[in-house]
Image (tube, rainbow, N blue to C red):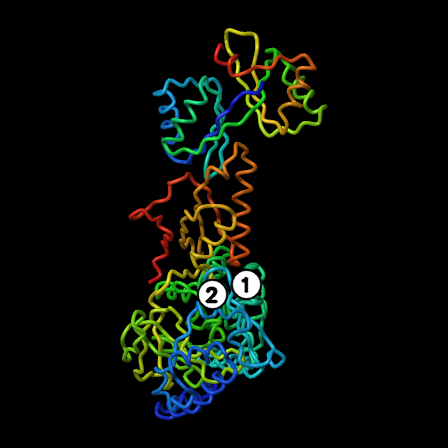
Amino acid sequence: MEKKYYQPEFETMPVEDIKKLQSEKLVKQVKHVYENVEYYRNLMDEKGVKPEDIQSIDDLHKLPFLSKADLRDAYPYGLLAKPLNECVRIHSTSGTTGRRVVAFYTQHDVDLWEDCCARAIVAAGGTKDDVCQVAYGYGLFTGGAGLHGGSHKVGCLTLPMSSGNTERQIQFMTDLNATILCCTPSYAAYIGESLKERGISPKDVPLKAGIFGAEPWTEEMRKGIEEALGIKAYDIYGLTETSGPGVAFECCEQTGMHINEDHFVAEIIDPDTGEVLPEGEKGELVFTSLDKEAFPLLRYRTRDICVLSRKKCSCGRTLIKMAKPMGRTDDMLIIRGVNVFPSQIETVLLNQGYQPNYQIVVDRVNNNDTFDVNVEMTPEMFTDKMSEVLSLERKLADEMKIMLGINPKVHLVAPKSIQRSEGKAVRVVDKRKLI
Amino acid sequence: MAIKQLTVFVENKQGALVTITDTLAKNNVNIRALSIAETNDFGMLRLIVNDEVTAEKTLSEKGYLVKITDVVGVKIGDAPGKLTAALEVLANAGINMDYLYAFMLRTEKHAYVVLRVENNEIAEAALEKAGFHLITNADICKL
């Protein structure tokens, strides 16, 4: 019989018991962090909060927030709570101004993260009889490693494809009978189109489910992917700061993602006042990791705008659900699954001697993100030689690729040609209509 | 000896060139030679004019990126093989060329070549030594 849950004892735990478990874990975690992370201890001291003040999950609101800026300030070891020789892994994501976010994992942390991913795979119908094709990027990015580990835990036959090389993806998928596909939704859509181009019908592809995340996607996109691949498409949420994908995952109801509350507490706050909002209200999503050892962030502000719901779910899980994020409280863009901050572009331009007059144009063409950066040429940079001007463009694109990890198309444009709004250049034009 | 060339950064959109030539015309600047190099994103308009100072000033005031560069001008015979002869001189002197463009007048038995090279002095000396006649802005204005 198909297993419905990976860890039913937690996934279907009565809400009261979850809260009790969270309280116990939180008290221990706060003590662990206070004793081992000077950076956070200072924040708590500034706020006048002692570990003893945290007796249950109801005291969570007393703790100070952490933000991306704190991660930048504390780079690289400032938020580490375990000796480095007890850590076994690092993952990383881009930061706001070029300094990357570096997250550390002990073996225990990797295990709990992989458990979370395993829950997502089982919720998507995965069993040890499945062949799970992981087409998220492997490497510093958490996508590949997370789902790979989860797939092992479930006992699926794992295809560690990493992203790209669509020809090979399709060959493995069809020859080796992959039944579950894990990748970004835009890549899933791209694979779907590639199948169509090759005249391969969804019926001829053994896939039954897909677990897609790391970037925003719409219900329309879900429908398109489901039709193109002949599967059911499940959303998954996570961020490097909290471990990676699997913090929350979708079940068969497909009406939001269950948060793994035995490991993470979610709060919704008013982004302006920091005040905790009641369930059902829209605000900024904040996560506290309850039992991560090496990189245990307390009250980390994700900047994602979201809503939580405790409504009973037909799948039987009691874990609270989060809606798809509805936007950001900052200007972060997610392009091809990668976090991009306009400030990073600005840093590159200033380093290269340009004025910060630029415009990022993002669009989605054939379900693939396009990423163009228009940069105003300066008199100092301008020369009469075409080869030199073209190499300026290339140099900028190369530097941005180093900073961001993805390739933009850089276009040098005439001075003052970028559209301005009340004197300020319009920095971002996002034509994707994702929300 | 060199000729003053203007290079203007031109956006790749309709009417971009017209605004430039119109600005020059309204300021009584006469274009003697021009060449355009383009990419998908932008174009670079290179001009030899009778009054580069006025041209640069008026275009800059309109917000254009303008750069004045010294280039080499050389007069060659209007017959097969004449350009080759000039280019051979430069090649033999080990001079790298970035671009060139040429123009000719109906009334003359000559063509004029504008050359952008890495070292003007060496190129000019080599060409003169080979018997080529170099031209200046003043010559161009008289044409």
> Is B143 above or below relative to A76?
above
Q: SS for tag 1?
A: loop
Quarter holding the N terminus of chain B?
top right
The answer to whether one can see residue A210 in this image is no
Q: Please, which chain is the residue tagged with disc 1 on?
A: A
Above or below, comparing residue A188 to residue A128 in the picture: above
Q: Chain of mark 2?
A: A
Q: Quadrant of residue A306?
A: bottom left
The part of the image, by quadrant, that contains residue B21 is top left
- Does any portion of residue A327 appear in the rendered image? yes
Q: Disc 2 versus disc 1: distance between alpha carbons?
A: 9 Å
* Secondary structure found at label 2: loop
Closest to the observer, A391 or A181? A391
Query: Circle 1: is it few (<14), some (14-19), or many (20+) Cα within 10 Å?
Result: some
Three-letter code for the amino acid on which mark 2 is drawn: Thr
Q: Residue at x 41, y 84 (%)?
A: A261
Q: Amino acid at mark 1?
A: Ser
Q: Which residue is mark 2?
A: A184
Percent x, y of residue A355: 44, 46
Residue A112 rendering spot, x and y as whole percentages: 51, 82
Q: Quadrant of residue B72?
A: top right
Q: Which mark is residue B36?
A: none
Number of numbered discs: 2
Report which residue position mark 1 lands on: A163
Residue A252 screen position, x and y as percent: 39, 78
Q: Earlier in the sequence, mark 2 or mark 1?
A: 1
Crowd rating for badge 2 (residues with CA inside 10 Å; few <14, some 14–19, many 20+) = many
Q: Are marks 2 and 1 in contact (CB under 8 Å)?
A: yes
Residue A78 in the image: state x and y as whole percent. 52, 74
- A84 or A266, which lies in front? A84
Task: Please name the residue shown 42% across and 36% down the image.
Answer: B12
Relative to A312, is A192 on the left or the right?
right
